[in-house]
Image: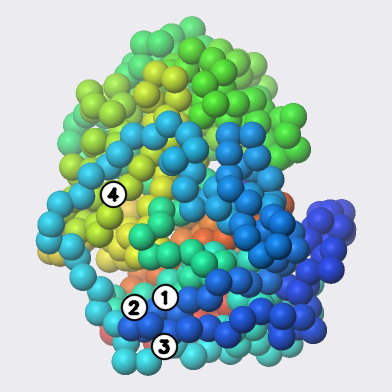
Amino acid sequence: MRWTLPIKSLWAVFVSVACLGIAGCSTSGQSKTSAWRVDQGIGMRADGPQMSLLSGVGASFTKGTRQNWWQAHAGVDSFSRLDEIFKASVSTTVAPVNVWRRSAAELTLTYQGATALGGGTKTINDYFERNPTTAMLIAKGDTLLLERYQYARQPRQRFTSFSMSKTIIAMLIGVALHEGRIRSLDDLAQVYAPGLQGTEYGKTPLRHLLTMSSGVEFREEYDGQDDSARLTRATITGQSEGGASLARLFNRRIAEPGQRWSYASAETFVLAVVLRQAVGQDVATYFSEKIWKPLGAEHEATWLVDSTGQEIGFMGFNATLRDYGRLGMLMAQMGVARGQQLVPASWVKEMTKAHVLPSATKRWFGYGYQTWVFPDLDGTFAFQGVRGQMLFVDPARQLVFVHLAARPTARDPAGGADAVAFWQALKRSIAPLSP
């Protein structure tokens, strides 16, 4: 996914799509949403802002299908069961569950809202009135400070990640490197995946795939006609033979590896192909054995796959809200969960530092190994996906913020700015751990 700084043209598109009589575009419509119900510390309600856009006839949510899953009115349903709409592999878990503690009272917080959404001092309830957030979790260490579900979503539902899954692929690349399954990041991709032989992606070092600097032409604009749309159609909808052969769809080099940063989902797909062949098993199983089971995940996770059963990697990881929180806390604790080093600490540091500075990405964030890095370069980083999927991590505070959503458009600079403003206020409210 990508965020850009709020610029006039993108904001105009957002307003035209999202503000057609929608309560969430201002505080004036707040009375139209229902009150929150809290049960055992979990906040829930059946509706939320922008209902006229995000639901079908009446107040019901449109059922997602292979034809409409990307459309705004189907997003609430499809984004919480995408693994039922498309073919998926499963990462199993095993008892015992890594149980969260829960704070005695839900977190209270005020923040300065994004100017594009009206600005002003806002509360957590205000945030939900302004944003089509389906689920949110805030955790510090082993304790949940907040857990909420909007639009009748439930704790057992698996929410899709979109490009947050890219960061998970990078985590697994680090595990495989530590185990010697991958020998060097300077190796070419085709060393591990013979099907990439003769392609420009095959001739790219893994290091430059991790940093989105392959130099292979790929257009990712989310206009329905770009290369990311072609890649999605070729993978999850099965419109190609799948696997490494897909690299031939995007096979024009426009820069030498490492010379030019350009966000490209195809680079993560190539990494997923390399990972599967390097470890000799499917990505879902490898992830289950190396991370999901020892992490103590509560529920199974799933991965969308192509026609060959290859996990597509650039999107399509699905998990429950609390399990996303566990995954984020694993990274906040430098790869350690329940006393086990699941991801090497040195790799966590390497993948979450800005190999590409914000000045080069032009996206406000810097970029690490398939990971977004906050521009203040204070050790905080983010998993991010289109339509409002975010997992923000602060190791210094062992603080995790999981945000899942059904934003109506792929690009939403105003919503992104509001989420960042919320995160910044959250960080200020919690002191870093003592050294």
Residue 164 lies, in percent from the top left, at: 48, 50
Residue on which disc 4 sits: 300
Question: Which residue is painted at 63% across and 60% down in the image?
Answer: 60
The reply to whether dot 2 and dot 1 touch (C-beta < 8 Å) is yes
The quadrant holding residue 248 is: top right
Q: How many marks?
A: 4
Which circle's residue, 3 or 2, is located before the other in the chain?
A: 3
**Which amino acid type is marked by label 3?**
Glu
Q: Which mark is residue 147?
A: 1
Question: How far apart are the two marked residues, 3 and 2, measured between alpha carbons?
Answer: 9 Å
Camera-near label (2 vs 1) is 1
At label 2, the amino acid type is Leu
Label 4 amino acid? Glu
Above or below residue 134? Residue 349 is above
Q: Residues within 10 Å of mark 3 (few under 14, many from 20)?
A: some
Q: Is residue 288 above or below residue 97?
A: above
Residue at x-position 73% and y-position 73%: 24
- Decide if residue 255 is on the left or right side of residue 141: right
**Residue designated by label 3:** 106
Q: What is the CA distance from the residue labelled 1 to the residue labelled 3?
A: 8 Å
- Quarter of the figure that contains the C terminus: bottom left
Disc 3 to disc 2: CB gap under 8 Å: no
Report if residue 362 is visible in the image: no
Q: Amino acid at mark 1?
A: Glu
Between disc 2 and disc 4, the foreground one is 4
- Please state the horizontal and vertical placement of residue 233, each as a whole percent of the image: 60, 26
Please give the residue where the numbered disc 2 appears in the rendered image: 144
- Disc 2 or 4, which lies upstream in sequence? 2
Residue closest to the eye, 147 or 52: 52
